[in-house]
């Protein structure tokens, strides 16, 4: 099992929920408002006067065989709207309750 952490511009929220549904990734936790900026590109998401956009984040636990198709769908969304910003990281899940 893997944890997929997704950080994205709030404008992507509904599309990401749709991707999770289509990829049969039912369970997730989301943070509606997070702040940040990319390491090398993209506009900061600070919710300030100078940088008004905001970001959201979702973490979902998925079976190993679902990770690659999920990342493919997220990559396609990011490539369609590269200025909005979308990143995803895959982490191992060693134990859960």
Image: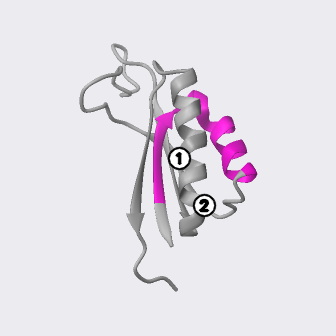
- Residue at x-position 36% and y-position 28%: 46
**Residue 39 at x, y = what percent?**
25, 32
**Residue 87 at x, y = what percent?**
43, 39
- On the picture, is 29 further left or further right than 27? left
Hey, which quadrant is residue 32 in on the image? top right
Labels 2 and 1: the sequence-earlier one:
2
**Residue placed most toward the observer, 77 or 34:** 77
Hey, which quadrant is residue 36 in on the image? top left
Colouring chosen for the image of the structure? one colour
Name the residue carrying label 2: 66
- Residue at x-position 61% and y-position 41%: 73
Marks 2 and 1 in Cβ contact (< 8 Å): no
Q: Mark 1: give few (<14), some (14-19) or many (20+) Cα within 10 Å.
A: some
Give the Cα separation between the discs numbered 2 and 1: 9 Å
**Residue 97 at x, y = what percent?**
52, 86
- Residue at x-position 24% and y-position 26%: 40
The residue positioned farthest toward the top in the image shown:
50
Magenta span: predominant SS is: helix
Hey, which quadrant is residue 85 in on the image? top left
Q: Can you say whether 92 is above or below 85 in the image?
A: below
- Residue at x-position 67% and y-position 36%: 15
Q: Assign a secondary structure to mark 2.
A: helix
**Residue 18 at x, y = what percent?**
72, 43
- On the picture, is 9 further left or further right than 11? left
The range drawn in magenta is 4-22
- On the picture, is 21 further left or further right than 4? right
Q: Assign a secondary structure to mark 1.
A: helix
- On the picture, is 42 further left or further right than 8? left
**Residue placed most toward the observer, 68 or 24:** 68
**Residue placed most toward the observer, 62 or 17:** 62
Name the residue carrying label 1: 71
């Amino acid at each position: 099992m893997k944890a997929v952490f997704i950080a994205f511009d709030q404008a992507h929220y509904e599309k990401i929920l749709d991707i999770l549904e289509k990829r049969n990734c039912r369970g997730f936790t989301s943070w509606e408002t997070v702040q940040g900026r990319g390491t090398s590109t993209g506009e900061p998401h600070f919710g300030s006067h100078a940088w008004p956009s905001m970001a959201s984040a979702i973490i979902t636990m998925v079976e190993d065989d679902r990770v690659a198709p999920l990342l493919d769908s997220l990559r396609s969304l990011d490539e369609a709207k590269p200025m909005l910003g979308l990143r995803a990281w895959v982490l191992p899940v060693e134990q859960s309750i």
